[in-house]
Amino acid sequence: MRDEQDDGRGAALAELRGRLAASVAVARLNRTQLAARAGLGRTTVSEALSPNGPVPSAETVAALAGVLKLPPGELLALHRTASAPHVVGDEGTVTADGPGRAIEGYSPHDLEVHPAGPGRIASGCGGVGGAQELPGYVSRGHDRVLAGAVSDAAAGRSGIVVLVGTSSTGKTRACWEAVQPLADRGWRLWHPFDPTRAQAALEDLHRVTPRTVVWLNEAQHYLGDRAFGERIASAVHQLLVSPERGPVLVLGTLWPEYAHRYTVLPAPGSDDLHSRVRELLSGRTLPVPDAFDSQALAAAAALAENGDLLLADALTRARDDGRVTQDLAGAPELLNRYHNPRTPAAKALLEAAMDARRLGVGPHLPPAFLTDAAIDYLGQTDYDQLTDDWAETAYAELAEPVHGKQAPLRRTTPRPSRRSPAPAIAPQAESRLRLADYLEQHGRTARRHLCPPASFWHAAHTHLTHPDDLNNLAQAAESRHRLQWAHHLRHRAADLGNTAALYRQAEHRDAAGDQEGAEALLREAADLGNISALYRLAVMRERAGDRDGAAVLARRA
């Protein structure tokens, strides 16, 4: 039976190619000309005519028949015979060559699973070895549904699941983890992407053999293609409903905006651009949440406690909002954007922001402060090449998001304070900038021994207005022996009502013998609620012989 099938397929393919080649000779067309007239790639045409090439797709045959003025029905009949899969052996083992390869032949990064954390970069492009480390996997609710689809496929029932979620929520990783049981059963996986995703899918979906996972990651590139999307949806549907071609499992991922676009009904009277796609996706999408719930966070914490350093690191930043996968996915690219910026000015701004955060400035940084602070982070050559719009260009570069919708330095508006009984503080009129958490944490380690340049301190004194920020920087300047800047920053903080700065100024006055000036500063600090100032006043009054005054101050403290 097998020999008869092979002979029939081979004969049909040979006749198909022979008729095409003869007509090409009569038409006196070279393959480049033929490809241009048929609207196909030259490689596609060459493979269609080559004795050693794969069976061409039905669309390729039809396009060539039209150009060469051959009867398409006859050629397509030969094509169906040549491309018909045959099955022999246990569990429907397929002996015909289909697209794809064994699942274990892929690494997760081959299939577009985002690298996680700042680990080493792959040295090669595919296969086992050299791939960047992945964190332990935390199973969530959608994983149970995926596991059911995989079990159905293993039992012989074809199916499709399309995971819908925002960027870097773990959709592709979930698919990768789900198919591992099929790897143990000898399944293959096909990821169509060359020459384009849509073209590869359309040309070879008819060649998919049983026990194949069809991997449609970022399915908008397939189903949303203007030229081929509807035809791809039809071909996938035909694959799923043809018992002789199964079992197969189709896995895809989509962002919510694409899923909505493809599934919403068109307005009355307008063209229905996605009717076949809508039918294919109906009841087959699976939502993936943006954040880990409490159960998933607990599971991640358990893995971290057992030595998973990537998860442990991510949880230091993402435990509160649960966006663990976004943090893991964004970290490598954030670090790359810092080390390899398009412009030196962008790196200077990031380093100024890193220094500000590690030395105690609040998370919302004024753009004017960073712009002035960044100047001395540039070498003389880079500084000489600055254009008038360098800051605007650099900020635009740093606002471009990476995986997980994170940006190295993004604009933000601080929320108003609502602490009772203090009155609410209105939001700043000027938007502020916020450094990505991962880069902030990286800066605290990588730059911990570095002292900011003079432009940093000057910009802080000129532009920062929060008394706590100024006092924190005064302390940082003093510990780094930038004593004049420490003095000026502390004065600014004291003038704005920072009690710690007032207390420190009082200590300096007292040490210089100006007891009256020291007491005035301490009383100002005490009136603002500084208990240490009351205690020091009591000590100074007792030292001056005013025991009653000291007792009053002590009781007040």
Image: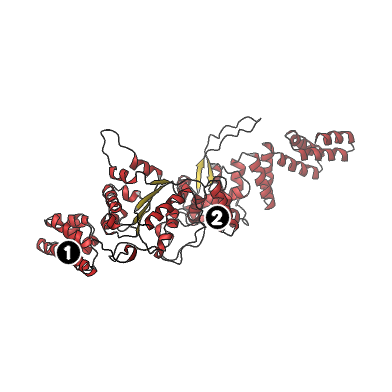
Check disc 1 and give the amino acid type.
Ala
Q: Residue 142, position in %: x, y?
A: 45, 49
Check disc 2 and give the amino acid type.
Leu
What is the quadrant of residue 105 in the picture? bottom left
Dot 2: within a 10 Å radius of its alpha carbon, few (fewer than 14), some, or many (20 or more) residues?
many
Disc number lying in front (2 or 1)? 1
What is the quadrant of residue 518 in the picture? top right
Q: Quadrant of the N terminus?
A: bottom left
The residue identified by callout 1 is 12
Q: Residue at x 61, y 47 (%)?
A: 457
- Label 2–label 1 contact, CB within 8 A: no
The residue identified by callout 2 is 311
Q: Residue 487, position in %: x, y?
A: 69, 45
**Foreground residue, 554 or 207?**
207
Q: Which mark is residue 474?
A: none
Q: Residue 268, position in %: x, y?
A: 27, 33
Q: Residue at x 21, y 56 (%)?
A: 58
Q: Residue 275, position in %: x, y?
A: 28, 42
| Pointer 2 or 1: first along the chain | 1
Q: Is residue 105 left or right of residue 512?
A: left
**Foreground residue, 374 or 320?**
320
Q: Is residue 426 left or right of residue 488?
A: left
Residue 343 appears in view: yes
Q: Residue at x 25, y 62 (%)?
A: 85
